[in-house]
Amino acid sequence: MAEKILIIDDDLDTLRLVGLMLQRQGYNIVAATNGEQGLSQAFVENPDLILLDVMMPDMDGYEVTRRLRKNPATATVPILMFTAKTQLDDKVTGFEVGADDYLTKPTHPSELQAHVRALLARSDKKTAPQTATTGQEQRGYVIGVLSARGGLGVTSVAANLAAGISSRAQVDVILAELTPGRGTLGLDLGLTGGKELNDLISGSLVEITREKVAAALVPHVSGIKLLAATESPRDVNLTSQVNNYEALVSRLASLSRFIVLDLGTGLPPFVQKILPMCSERIVVVEGVPNSIHHSKILIDEISALGIDRKAIVAVLNNRVRSETQMPWTQVQEKLNHSIAITLTPAPELFFQAARNQTPSVVCQPTNVTSQQFLKFADQVMEREKAR
């Protein structure tokens, strides 16, 4: 895979010329036109090398470097300062704040290419012994759970799937409710929370570090580590922080083998950004005509995002006992998508689980519906092993 180089420069001509030159050398190029945008790109794109201009408005290259070095995610990424400043003191300052190399403008293309190759080679040698460990840390199996509309049991499916995987695999599982303003998990599981999620997605992208995300997770006796959403309706505005959501999910994926995301309903921009990051996507469906119709549209639109339909899993959640609900074979035919599992109605089970403030699979693991959740957890674990 080609190395990724992030170029941060407010001079559009430099961005275009240098980017094109390096692209012709086989590198994958990402560009930013100011310091703040450059930091955002660095935390999201995980570049192999950063080519950074010093003289930029608002935030110069020195400050960008300081912030990159303070964040564990970018602390070791090689930085090549590329600038018109030629004074010795300027170069010293660059090295003091954490730059690895320094070139002055204008420079010959072959000189720039030689410095880029040397920095990338040194970086490879430094990280080679740690490659396996780092890869394992960042290969968490991310499961996004959503539905076409509210009231179909997305949160119940997400919570019981997470608890079921934890029970079967005997590992901690992260359950993140990413719907500020519509949170229910904290109340359901007897945990206070929500402020941690708000702080993460409302703050600066620079602050979404692996350590801060890990500290925000609240442990539950079921084996779940929970990141809960708030109940205050006004907090729904936080879902506009799309880049912060992307960075948050990236950090969560490095913290556990399994990560279950409660994505709520529909396809708002933050969900569209997160879904391609997921290993699989679970669409919760109810066996009534309108729900099937809306769910079919949702699956089609998820597929339109470039996601393989085979990586979209449909779960038929029959929440209430009713003769109007269709059998799974008929739902599958109308949905034009296979049903992975059918959950039978169990209102008494969910009522008891709510009273005990624990997922149903923990409250009564031998219940028929709990067994269905556990079977579903087994299916997910098999797919995780096969990926």
Image (tube, rainbow, N blue to C red):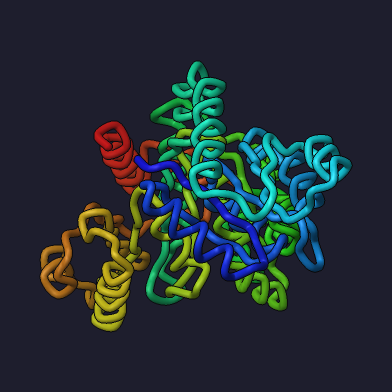
Question: Residue 87 versus residue 254: which sits nearer the camera?
Answer: 87
Q: Is residue 212 left or right of residue 283?
A: right
Q: Position of residue 155 (x, y in %)?
A: 49, 59
Quadrant (top left, top right, bottom left, bottom right) of the N terminus: top left
Q: Nearer the viewer, residue 119 or 308?
A: 119
Q: Which of 45 and 116 is in front in this view?
A: 116
Is any part of residue 353 visible from this angle?
Answer: no
| Position of residue 35 measured from the top left corner of the image (x, y, whole percent) | 72, 60
Give me the residue at 43% from left, 73% from top.
267
Q: Where 240 sits versus 56, above or below?
A: below
Q: In which quarter of the image is residue 195?
A: bottom right
The quadrant of the picture occupied by the C terminus is top left
Percent across and percent down for residue 7 are 58, 55
Q: Which residue, as the protein is rendered here, is positioned at the far top?
A: 129
Count of residue discs: 0
Q: Where's residue 133, x and y in %?
A: 49, 22
Picture residue at 71% right of the left edge, 45% below the top: 68
Quarter assignment of residue 233: bottom right
Q: In this view, does 157 lie above or below 266?
A: above
Residue drawn at 81 percent across, 67 percent down: 58
Residue lying at 47% horizontally and 48% vertically, measured from the top left: 260
- Please state if 311 lies on the left or on the right of 121 as rendered: left
Is 4 above or below relative to 276?
above
Q: Is residue 119 visible?
A: yes
Above or below, 322 relative to 230: below
- Looking at this view, name the residue that lies furthest to the bottom: 290
Q: Is residue 26 left or right of residue 194?
A: left
